[in-house]
Image: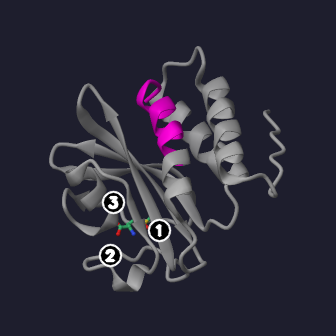
Amino acid sequence: MFDFAPDPDLEKPVLYSALARAAQALVDGERDSVANMANLAAVIWQFVPDLNWAGFYRAIGDELVLGPFIGKPACIRIPFGRGVCGTAAASGAAQIVPDVHAFPGHIACDAETRSELVVPIVSGGRVIAVIDLDSPTPGRFDDEDASGMQLVAQVAAMAI
Ligand code: SME
């Protein structure tokens, strides 16, 4: 078992760089993508405060399919271009959504979710998956969260 003990008072850049290091350590030497996504979801959950959902959607054909996650059961298939996840996958750009109710086409999986961050995972020039973080707090995510999670997405790109 890996018992990371992140300090919740760390500045975001420091916290995310520690998270990226922990993520790298967890996937080192392991090639199974399901195991790696499961451990990455768990370590994100340990490091990033104030989340109610953290996990992966994988790009399969022209849709996203639910992968390993922590949180309540979620919708399984999301077409590219739909919702926050599908928008991130189709555009290749991170989506910071301060108020999910104001995002056209937002797909509600957990009624508690108020804000959301989705970061694409790019490998070989294409989006192979996304990391989705949901929070019960409005406006929970900013550019520092997006940049930090991009570090984790780079680790994931080599491991899933
Ligand atoms: N809200 C997402 C769907 C996934 S759940 O949040 C886990 C979306 O709009 O794409």
User: Relative to 23, does residue 86 appear above or below in the rendering?
Assistant: below
> CA gap, disc 2 to disc 3?
9 Å
Residue 38 position within the rendered picture, expressed as x and y whole percent measured from the top left:
56, 41
User: Badge 2: how crowded within 10 Å, few (<14), some, or many (20+)?
Assistant: some
Part of the protein shown in magenta? 149-160
- The quarter of the rendered structure image containing the N terminus is top right
**In the image, what residue type sits under mark 3?**
Cys
Quick check: is the Cβ at mark 1 less than 8 Å away from ligand 1? Answer: yes
- Magenta stretch mostly in which secondary structure? helix
Question: For mark 2, what is the residue?
Answer: 106
The residue at 25%/60% (across/down) is 87
Residue 152 inside the magenta-drawn segment:
yes
Circle 3 crowding by C-alpha within 10 Å: few under 14, some 14–19, many from 20:
many
Compare residues 126 and 58 and report the one nearer the observer: 126
> Which amino acid, mark 2?
His
Q: Which is more toward the observer, 114 or 39?
A: 114
Q: Secondary structure at mark 3?
A: helix
Please give left or right for residue 108 compared with residue 12 in the image: left
Quarter containing ligand 1? bottom left
